[in-house]
Amino acid sequence: MNEYVITYTAQDGASFRMNIVDRTEAAAKKFFRETAKECGRTFQSIELLRTDAPATKRNERETLEVIRQMVADLGPDSYIGTAFEGCFEDAEWNIENDWGNSQKRLADAAAEKVTELEAKVKELEGKLAQEIAEKQQARDEAQAVIRKLEAKTLSAEDLEAVASILENQAEEAEELAEKAAAEIVRFAEAPALPEFAAAVSRHRNHTAHAKSLQELLGKVDAIRANHHAGA
């Protein structure tokens, strides 16, 4: 934009200078006359001060109205008008609040957030898969113990040790289920977050694992009872 210096005289004959930013000398003179008419100012001369002046809010508002009218003249179903939906409102907000927002920046920020969430979901899925694998391994190990118990007679001390292991594992699984339940409550107000879904999944898996261990423990206790009865 061009910045001009206009020299003018007031009603009392005193001389003053005024800086005006506009596209052309004619536009600057027009703006001066519109604002000076009721103040009794008389134009004397105009001088170009520089050609790289930043636009003023007046320039921004006037340009926005020109663009808005040009787009409106294209009709309600124009391609350009569709592309500009919401942009004029953003421009007005930027001008009045000295901000630099745009539809593109909002879209880019949203896309970046989606990428971050996708990465988080992938990370949570990996952790969940690892947890499931670990719980399955523990379940398989417990089943192997049961099969050994069914295949041979163990001493009372061995049966007690097995029962203790299963009881400890069951308590650990129940504690993990309680922690997952707390996480569910924590994110209950934002069920769309991946953390909420992960907590629900963990709670389901830990609860099922604890139940399975309790069932196995019941079988071991039954074997121990039979062992004592036959002793």
Image: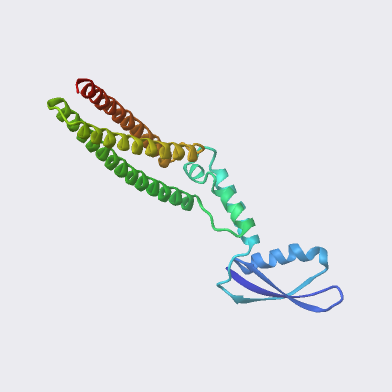
Q: Quadrant of the N terminus?
A: bottom right
Q: Is residue 73 above or below residue 5?
A: above
- Residue 77 left/right relative to 138: right
Q: Nearer the viewer, residue 197 or 19?
A: 197
Q: Is residue 172 above or below residue 227?
A: below
Q: Nearer the viewer, residue 58 or 138?
A: 138
Quarter of the rendering containing residue 36: bottom right
Please give the name of the residue rendered at 33% of the width and 46% of the height, measured from the top-left corner.
123
- Count of marks overlaid on the render: 0
Q: Position of residue 222 (x, y in %)?
A: 26, 23
Please give the name of the residue rendered at 82% of the width and 79% of the height, measured from the top-left corner.
14
Q: Position of residue 220 (x, y in %)?
A: 24, 27
- Residue 19 left/right relative to 200: right
Color scheme of the displayed model: rainbow
Please give the name of the residue rendered at 34% of the width and 36% of the height, measured from the top-left corner.
173
Q: Is residue 66 above or below residue 133?
A: below
